[in-house]
Image (cartoon, rainbow, N blue to C red):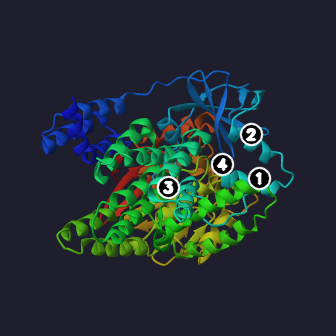
Amino acid sequence: MKQVFSEFRNHALLASVLLMAVLFPMQYKLSIAVLAIAFYWLRTKSRSVVVFIMVLVLALIPRRMKMPGREGIVVSRSARYVTVLSEGAEGIVYFQSEPPVLDSVVRLDGQWEEITYSKGFFRFDFAKYCRRQNRHYSMSCVPVEVKPSHSLRGLLQKHIAGMENAEKRVLLDRLIFGIRNEEVPLSSSLQDSGFSLAGVLMFLNWLLKYFLNKEDLEKVMLVITGVMALFFHFPYLLVQRLIFALLKRNKELTYRQRCGIGWIIGLVLYPHVITSASFLLPSVYRFTSLFGERKKIISAFWAGIMQSLLFHQWSPLMTSVYPFLVSVQGCLFLFALLSCFVPLPLTAVSVLDRIVSLLDLFVFPGTILGFGAVFFILLCFLSRKNPRKYVIWLAWFALFQCSGLFHPFAELTFINVGQGDAILLRAPLGMDNVLIDTGKESQYRNLKTMLDAKGIRHLDTFFVTHADSDHSGNRDAVIKEYSPDQVIEEHQERTDSRKLSFFDLNEISSEDENASSLVLYTMIGDTKILLTGDCDAAGEKQIVRKYGDLDVDVLKLSHHGSHTGSCEEFLNAARPEVAVVSSGAYRIYHHPNPEVVQRLLARHIPYVDTKEEGDITFLFLGKFCIMITSAGHIAMV
């Protein structure tokens, strides 16, 4: 057995990398696990494969969905909800009054409901995030405190809640507990990364090294890490530091072995962190430190890739100074903690926030998750034998990210904004960016995520089909953020953008917003597209009388598939290859209407709905048009 573990220790780095591949959220986990085990055995011929199989079994055991009870303890908190541990299961509770204090016991008066997915290509899926942590249920109620909190962090939060200065309360909650609140007067991304706890350790390590020798410093930092982990109830970031600090005390282990063993222990304890920034970013810096030469170039390349994947942007300047900024975050945390008991001004936070805001000016939006990534990977593969390959790869990445080459093809995307419309059209290589409608105000984050992921910093044309909030709710925010060259809100027969032209087919102008909605016709390549806004049947019939057979390829059904539109005469004239519905929850809005669905089926017109498919993209590749949905469905149009 000793020899087995000795062999496993020698191959721990390889085992940890394969475990990451297994834990990454994807289909066919069992097949991937089998391939990982086979690869590990072929590479090592080691009997420690038995240990690795045990690790994989632990990682692959399905987690049981258990409904929490009616009374539980508050284990974590955000600005809008708390996580309650009850009867061995965790649930999300959206509070409707003053939020309960951490580690207090609360009674819940509401119904648990299963957390539903919100599909999208790039958006943050809260349901997936919760389910990875084995949280499957949520409720909205007023939690009633049964027993007050007696933990140190609970008492500290209660002390902060009792402060008279509201702005200081919100700021301290943000700096100490990471509770994100829109009222926080911070404009930079300084506190968005959530690495302030790691920053505390980095700052204290830098400070104490002037007073302690190396051996004593390691012992003191181990104790500090343990105390902080206990205070904050063992978050992964601190537990990871604690694991690596303990492994470092074993002088027989090499740095590679410590990395491998540390990652395996951390991932077995916290398998849900595999896609989080708290795991990926530190792992990138730790992994690149294994290379003997060009560590900075290698770190810059992989950190850029991770930024693009996680945050849909790349900040080369932020990457170069990030370790320093993390230390600054730690310093701010200690300063905020001290200000809870000593009347210290927090103006230093505001000043530093303004300075860091300057770094946000050198940010290139966009994500590597586009069809251009195929060409990027091919270029990297062709230059893999070059001794300066990482310099070349970093140059390729900078070119693709800054020029939008990760998304090189023309496309039409129906963004999933719930009950509302938001449609993005792009010419090849981003030479024309057109947005039609914005969805409700509550959907701005999802809209912005899509635009930023596509690398859009500026809109060429912005259409607002009519003034209903589910179409124009973010009008002012879009104009402020993306400075469109032209904003079209009134009927005009033709609108020319940089590469695309649009024709408004609706001539009705009245007090009825839906009847007066813009109805836009355009072409991308040979594909004819008709976007009907909330036009009603009367408007559709008038369009048919004037234009006759429309014979379009892609039709956006009017008014989210409501019975007020998509009349038989219009569908007969349009004869689309595919119809698109942009709708919200059926139990609330009842869209698309069953009568409209029957009309489509009677004409053999297939339809897709953002409610079911999430974001829906039509990709134009020469004469070919491919439909791809965030639910994973692909079809040729």
Task: Kindly report the distance in space between the C-alpha atoms of the residues bearing marks 2 and 4.
Answer: 13 Å
Give the residue pinned by disc 2.
155
Q: Which amino acid, mark 1?
A: Cys
Q: Secondary structure at mark 2?
A: helix
Tag of residue 68:
none
Residue nearest the viewer, comparing 285 with 96? 285
Q: Secondary structure at mark 4?
A: helix
Q: Secondary structure at mark 1?
A: loop
> Does residue 400 show up?
yes
Q: Residues within 10 Å of mark 2 (few under 14, many from 20)?
A: some
First-in-chain label (3 vs 1): 3
Q: Is residue 89 left or right of residue 613?
A: right
Give the residue pinned by disc 4.
177
First-in-chain label (4 vs 1): 4
Task: Kindly report the distance in space between the C-alpha atoms of the residues bearing marks 3 and 2.
Answer: 30 Å
Q: Which amino acid, mark 3?
A: Leu
Residue furthest out toward the right:
164
Does the residue at mark 4 contact the one at mark 1 (Cβ under 8 Å)? no
The percent position of residue 125, horizontal first and vertical second, equals 51, 45
Q: Quadrant of residue 473?
A: bottom right
Task: Kindly report the distance in space between the C-alpha atoms of the residues bearing marks 4 and 1.
Answer: 13 Å
Q: Is residue 209 left or right of residue 58?
A: right
Q: Which quarter of the rendering shows the N terminus? A: top left
Give the residue pinned by disc 1.
340
Q: Residues within 10 Å of mark 3 (few under 14, many from 20)?
A: some
Of the residues tagged 3 and 2, which is closer to the observer? 3
The percent position of residue 41, horizontal first and vertical second, equals 16, 39
Q: Which amino acid, mark 2?
A: Leu
Q: Name above or below for residue 104 compared with residue 301.
A: above
Task: Kindly report the distance in space between the C-alpha atoms of the residues bearing marks 2 and 1.
Answer: 12 Å
